[in-house]
Image (cartoon, helix red, strand yellow):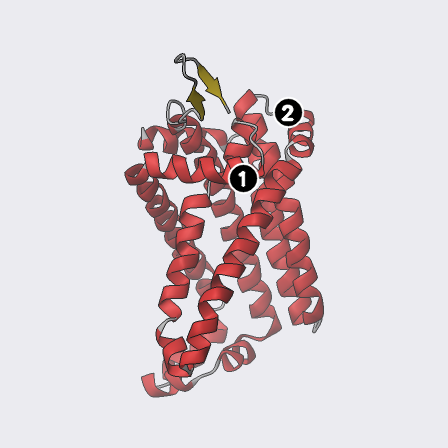
Amino acid sequence: MTLESLKDAVGLLRHPVIWSVGLVMGGFLFATATIAVSGGVFYAEPLMLLLSLVIPFLAGGIYGTVRDEAFSAGAFVQSGKTYYFGILLPGLVIFFAAILTVFLLAIPLALLGAGAAASMAPLLFGVLISIVFFTFFYDTVAVFEETNVFESIRRSIEFVMNNLGRTILFYLTNVIIFIALWFAGSFVWTTLLIDKLEPLTSMSPTEIQAMMPQDILTLIGTEGIWVISGVTAVVIVLFSAFMYAYKVSFFRNHAEGTRMQQGVYDEKGRWYKY
């Protein structure tokens, strides 16, 4: 069924609304890079905040159109508005829970000293990865099952636990696709900037290792930064569109029959759903 989800995701990409999230994310990335090159680094963080507020609308629109199999622009907008807060609020809960977890772990590490804190950095990273791993499908749950804030998070964890092997394969597939697109993009921008990168061929490995990021930026110039930003934006567009299409296909194909009903039996054996 994992391969079926992959095929369904590719099929969904023929609908323009599925590309909305990729186009927006790629556009934001290119705009951020352009502003940074122009010296307006101050505006980069507000742009990222704006993106985080736009994504729930786009996700709601995509999931709703896939669920109802109505891929018109009107259905997309209506679904995005309907499920906006149903996606935004659980996302905020997860975000602040992750921040609180890191903060609580950082306190004893700070008391132990800088050395202990540095050695425990992988632990903090692992905790964050675990949170993302189990709560990743909260937004698809919010749309497909129309759950409240905490139920969306709980159901995401339940879904992952019930499909643990398939979910790991899902993540691995996304990682492989991203790496493939990243290498393809790197090949493209390297080819386009071959003349500017030619001086690197005359340097020794030691000299290349000693180069700082700003040295590379000076070497390729503003034009090179624009090329890299443009190619990277295209990679983000392609990967984001694929990931959301694959995510909704994967959830739709595996969620059915995995939900555990919540309730109790009374003294007469009658079932009462929560």
Residue visible at 46% across and 44% down in the picture:
136
Picture coordinates of residue 152, whole percent (x, y): 52, 36
Horizontal arrangement in the rendering, residue 114 relative to residue 148 (left or right): left
Decide: few, some or many residues near mark 1? Use Cα within 10 Å; few <14, some 14-19, many ≥20. some
Residue 17 seen in the figure: no
- Please name the amino acid that badge 2 sits on: Ser
The residue singled out by tag 1 in the image is 150
**Foreground pick, 194 / 43:** 43
The part of the image, by quadrant, that contains residue 41 is: bottom right
Picture coordinates of residue 57, whole percent (x, y): 65, 39
* Furthest-left residue in this view: 165
Residue visible at 46% across and 77% down in the picture:
110
**Foreground pick, 4 / 131:** 131
Work out whether 231 lies above or below 119.
above
Q: Secondary structure at mark 2?
A: loop
Work out whether 187 lies above or below 77.
below
Picture quarter with the N terminus:
top left
Picture coordinates of residue 65, whole percent (x, y): 58, 26
Q: CA distance from mark 2 to mark 1?
A: 30 Å
Picture coordinates of residue 224, whole percent (x, y): 56, 69
The residue singled out by tag 2 in the image is 72
* Furthest-front residue in this view: 267
Residue visible at 35% across and 75% down in the picture:
119
2 and 1 marks in contact (CB < 8 Å): no
- Please name the amino acid that badge 1 sits on: Phe
**Foreground pick, 272 / 120:** 272
Horizontal arrangement in the rendering, residue 221 relative to residue 125 (left or right): right
First in sequence, mark 2 or 1: give its number. Answer: 2
